[in-house]
Amino acid sequence: MLSLYTFILLIFGLAVVLDAKSSSGNSVLVILDPARRPDYSIFFDGLQEKGYDLTFRAPKDETPVLIQDDIPSFAHVVFFESDTKHFAKDITPQTLVELLSGKTNLLIALSQKQNLLTSFAPEFSLILPPPGSSLLSYFPERKENNSVVPIEVPSSSNIISAGTAPVWFSGVPFVLGNNPLIFPILNAPAESFAADAEGITPDALADAAEKGGEGLWAGSQLAVAAGFQTLGNARVAWLGGVELFSNEFAKKEISKGVKSGNQQAAADIAAWTFQESLVLRIDSTTHHLVNTSVPKEHYTINDVVEYIAQISRFNPNKGKWEPYSGINDLQLEFTMLDPHIRTALPPVPGSPGKYAVTLRVPDRHGVFKFVINHKRKGWTYLQSSTTVPVVPPRHDGYPRFLSAAWPYYAGAISTSLGFFVFSALYLAGDARETNLRKAKGAKAQ
Amino acid sequence: MSTAYPLPTNLSKTTVANTASLLRIVALGLISAAAIASRLFAVINFESIIHEFDPWFNYRATRVLAAKGFYEFWNWFDPTAWYPLGRVVGGTVYPGLMATSGVIYNFLHAFNLPVDIRNICVLLAPGFSALTAWATYMFTKEMKDESAGLLAAAFIGIVPGYISRSVAGSYDNEAIAIFLLMFTFYCWIKALKTGSALFGTLAAVFYFYMVAAWGGYAFITNMIPVHALALMLMGRFSSRLYVAYCSWYAIGTLSSMQVPFVGFQPVRTSEHMGALGVFGLLQIVAFAQLARSHLSSKQFQNLLTVAVIVMGVVGTFGFIALTYMGWIAPWTGRFYSLWDTGYAKKYIPIIASVSEHQPTAWPSFFMDLQFLIFLFPAGVVLCFRELRDEHVFVIIYAVVASYFAGVMVRLMLTLTPVVCVASAVAFSSLMDTYLDPTQPEAEGESRPAEVDASAASNGSTASTASKKEKEKAKKPAAGGALSDIVAATSSSKKSKGVWGLDTRLVVIAHSLLMLGFFVFHCTWVTSSAYSSPSVVLASTNADGSQHIIDDFREAYYWLRQNTAEDAVVMSWWDYGYQIAGMADRPTLVDNNTWNNTHIATVGKAMSSSEEVAYPILRKHDVDYVLVIFGGLLGYSGDDINKFLWMVRIAQGVWPDEIQEPNYFTPQGEYRVDDRASSAMRNSLMYKMSYYRFAELFGGGQAVDRVRQQTMPKTGPTLDYLDEAFTSENWIVRIYQVRKEDDLGRDLKSANAFAQGKKRKRTKPVSKRRAITV
């Protein structure tokens, strides 16, 4: 029995070692026509090398299913087959959203044709150009087709590693709507525009230009790759074209002697999507009175409380969570309906991963919450809420002796004294009177 | 002396006295038993359960007190009430009731009697009703004699006006407050009669208990000063009054300030100023008496005039100035609504929305008091005959309580004791007259009435002789009764009476019949009207058997067992205490209606559309919304019928967003069918009430049985809430508030997407704007 137990442990231990560098699982489903699989072998080999477990499925295959018994079957889904018009029954926009709520990550490549993604993309506030459009650019002058566009990797990007050479792109650009959860990974070059393959401006562009909205499907406000992180921290990467990941573009030189950055960019985008990079988590939060260490069930108003959060970041190289002190703009709110206190939650120097702040509880009783709500583009959202009632002082928690109450103390003392004196005098006087009366009586006698 | 019937002559006076006192004890014991027994209908017909709404909070608080002790209760902060504001229970509660139960609980447990705290709570009210009967006996004894006392005790024991608030399970402050009220009054009368500081102190102690037990203590706070003032105005100032009032006021006020909920109110609010004013006046009058005994009358006259003018001016201006400076709180809204019955509806809808704050309907006087309501004026008039100090008290009490009972249904409770006392005085006078065996002398020969030894009219020392006018007093004509008083006071020399047994028997038999009917009436009203726990409803099957409708507990237990322990439940405030008590979940608002804005927030959420309500729900961390819907069963106390109050209360805070007229049809009707206004149909309350209601009728005509209206075939749809639970008879419906959409969409479009509806194609908006100027 024991040996079986150790064996199971061993297997799990091995699994951890063999695990991919993702923080959320290593099973990947790739929806792609088998015939086109070799075109992307560099990308797929790269994934497999990292330890991902790839499963391929043709778009019309019924198996393996995406969702079994309401539980997503794979940790990540790569959706490269977008030229197909018809898909198997279980691949619908609705099931893809369901996958996301089941914390499955999606890597989706768009195509120029109209298919299920056309109705799926708007849910992410992605605005697609009319079907058949693609990104064109005449600059810089080059031998290639105008629809194959070199794109500079923005230096500020935290998803694609710095120093990556420009990448080749071919496919559909799109505009990002006003959903705050979506952000561009790669923008189109400023000189580029969307048009159909022949280079004739589509009606939409013309219409829009006529209405005064000059150059809507043009310029750097177009994106060719975008990231989307759901509130549940599932990640979706939208790509304008699947060619970005192809072997052809990966090998293609961007300028003489310089290989394109496609391979690196593809790996980085996949790493982000598969929860490898920019993954954070709150390990624990505690709170306690200053100078003590045990959290209290409730605090009294005006108590001074220390709040501590322990935050880790996933290190994909080691496949391990490591304490992370790199967040400098973390905030803590102490909220009841509205934040009563909003303060910075700075990292504690010297103790990695520890963020702490000391605050004075407001002079207001009620059910308060310590709230961390840290949303930064690309990074995992950090959300934590700890409920703590704040109570008024106990009946014996007030000061017993108030200097302001001296008039009352004086009144009470003087009345007591007066009563004492009065009683004494009264009793004594009574005695004398009776004595007198006695004396009188004696005299009379 | 001739007697109407033979009397035993060989009895010694002590035997008679002992027998009479034994009979009194037995009678009081039986009255107590009857008082307790008639309150047990609720337990027998249903079960040992806490009733209604407020008792559930009292019960919960008592459990805390019993489990954790008094100091924990005192410092109890309840984070689940008024989420997220919380409630400082120790400082916002009248702890007398819970403390009483806690003492009984600990007492019984000290004797190793493991009685469940619930049973103590359930049976506390019947137990105290027996004490009330005793207190009323003592009080009435001071008014007339022991026989009247026994009658009053019997009346108060079974009169429905008091039973309505004290059946088993009705664990509310009133359960013990009426006993305290009567006993405080008794002590006051006793103190006044004897001039004893001991009884004055006793009155103060019981006054303190009353303050700790019920907000209605203000009634005592004003009754006793009014009595004292009336006595002074009648020129009846005496050192007895001075001692009684001063000892009561000083000790009573100081001790009442020890109750945290009352605090400094006795010296800071207008409601308590009368007592303070009379206290001051008494000192002045006492000083004037002293001065008079030391000064010549001329000097005294001058002094008096100047002093009265100066003090009147200073007092009035002082009061006004203090009120303006904010040292004295002006009258509260609840107080104004006692004088102007339309006030509350206009300015404080939250008070007007409570059904027991409505003016009393005429039939309920008869329902609650039956024939006592006819005897009551006769008793009051009889008080004028002697008009001792204590009779003045009853007269004032009768006038004030009658007025208040007419203003508010719930104040019927304060009227009931005085009705019982006055009726008992009247009835026992009648009995005295007709049971008195002495026959009048044939001629107008003046002879003093002997103290009669018969057990029936024991010990009526004062005036047994002249009571023949009772046969006329039975006619309710006030003029006749008044002339009788005149006759009685002027011609007390002439002996009057009743001859023979036949007339006596007719009147006595008739009176006994009335008593019998009274007992039947009380039993019937108690069993049929006042014994329903309202948590459990009863209906009758076709074959006459009882059918229990237990939807409330079904739903509350569902909440208790199927939701997270910290899941916040929003409902209209009526159900707050029950949810806290039975489901043990945090609630947004409850029956302790101290925060109008918070209630208005719930009213706003209920009466606005889903899109407007959703942010409110999210802000308050609401997980579940509970509504009461009676349309299927015909349960008329449901939320749709209360809905206009929610609208009104919300309108009071957000007059721009919620307007009452929007919820009526253009013709001004309150409708829920397909002619309902759009504000009505889009309101969250309407949607939650009628969600999937039409489906229940399988394509047939869906009829709301409460409002007798035919519902449209397609019911409302919900995007922001999910139906979580609906009880067997659809009385309670619980909805779960949806989480925000994972993709950051609004839930309406997310819902549309999930149902496969295509979204309209969007085009990018231009970020550059043409310069237009």
Image (cartoon, coloured by chain):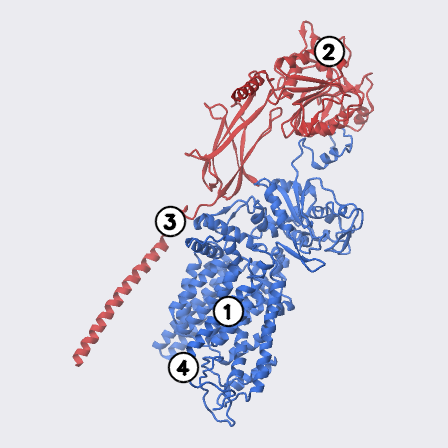
Chain colours: A red, B blue
Contact, mark 2 vs mark 1 (Cβ under 8 Å): no
Query: Which residue corresponds to mark 1?
Result: B30
The disc at residue A402 is: 3
How far apart are the two marked residues, 3 and 1, measured between alpha carbons?
Answer: 56 Å
Mark 4 and mark 2 residues within 8 Å of each other at the beta carbon:
no
Provide the secondary structure element on which disc 3 rests. loop
Look at the numbered disc 4 and give the secondary structure of its residue: helix
Q: Position of residue B716 (x, y in %)?
A: 74, 44
Name the chain under label 1.
B
Query: Quadrant of the rendered structure where residue B768 is?
Result: top right
Q: Is residue A207 visible?
A: yes
Mark-to-mark CA distance, 2 and 3: 86 Å
Disc nearer the start of the sequence (2/3): 2
* Element at label 1: helix
For label 2, the residue is A38
What is the x, y in percent for residue B568? 59, 43
- Which quadrant of the rendered structure holds the C terminus of chain A? bottom left
Residue at the image position 53 percent from the left and 40 percent from the top: A368
- Relative to the observer, which residue lies in front, B186 or A58? A58
Q: Judging from the image, what secondary structure is the residue with disc 2 in?
A: helix
Q: Nearer the viewer, mark 2 or mark 3?
A: 2
Quickly name the residue at label 4: B13
Q: Position of residue B473 (x, y in %)?
A: 58, 81
As shown in the figure, which amino acid type bears the numbered disc 3? Answer: Leu
N-terminal-most mark, 4 or 1:
4
Label 4 environment density (alpha carbons within 10 Å; few <14, some 14–19, many ≥20): few
Which chain letter matches label 4?
B
Does residue B387 appear left or right of residue B701 in this picture?
left
